Amino acid sequence: MQETIWSRITGKEKKIRSKEIAKQRLQNVLVQDRTHIPQFILNKIQEDVKKLICQYLEIDSTNFQINFKRSNGSLSMHVNIPVLKVKGDIEDNM
């Protein structure tokens, strides 16, 4: 708690957030450029995948990543989702 208050006072939290936002924007531009998929579609894919996964798992959405790669004329999607835990009602049915 004290670290959070201190980082707000010193502005470090804001710098980290700004850095991460800038990094994500750059990644989005690169993905869009490489895949030729419009940004609004990339955003929609990310939202839909998150919604689906969150029905079954608790995830760390701050480190959630979707990357597209083009090789040998085909496009592949790579998803990195840090899983925190399986949701209780799903776990009980297994």
Image (cartoon, rainbow, N blue to C red):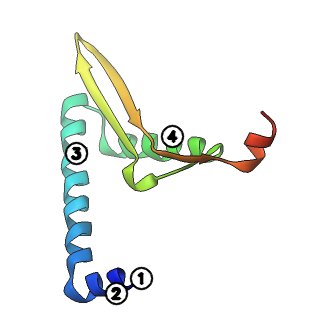
The numbered mark, 3 or 2, whose residue comes first in the sequence reads 2
The numbered mark, 3 or 4, whose residue comes first in the sequence reads 3
Question: Relative to 24, is 55 on the left or the right?
Answer: right
Q: Secondary structure at mark 1?
A: loop
Quadrant containing the N terminus is bottom left
Which residue corresponds to mark 2?
Answer: 5
Which residue corresponds to mark 3?
Answer: 27
- Give me the C-alpha separation between circle 1 and circle 3: 31 Å
Q: Looking at numbered disc 2 in the image, what kind of residue is underneath it?
A: Ile
- Give me the C-alpha separation between circle 1 and circle 4: 32 Å
Quadrant containing the C terminus is top right
- Give me the C-alpha separation between circle 4 and circle 2: 34 Å
Q: Looking at numbered disc 3 in the image, what kind of residue is underneath it?
A: Gln
Q: Looking at numbered disc 4 in the image, what kind of residue is underneath it?
A: Val
Kindly indicate whether the residue at mark 2 contacts the one at mark 1 (C-beta within 8 angstroms): yes
**Furthest residue in direction front, as rendered:** 2
Residue density around tag 1, few if under 14, some if 14–19, many if 20 or more, within 10 Å: few
Where residue 42 sits: x, y (%)? 36, 41
Question: Relative to 51, is 68 on the left or the right?
Answer: left
Question: Which one is in front in this view, the residue at disc 4 or the one at disc 2?
Answer: 2
The numbered mark, 1 or 3, whose residue comes first in the sequence reads 1
Which residue corresponds to mark 4?
Answer: 49
Which residue corresponds to mark 1?
Answer: 1
Q: Quadrant of residue 91?
A: top right
Question: Which one is in front in this view, the residue at disc 1 or the one at disc 3?
Answer: 1
Q: Secondary structure at mark 4?
A: helix
The numbered mark, 4 or 2, whose residue comes first in the sequence reads 2
Where residue 82 sits: x, y (%)? 45, 44
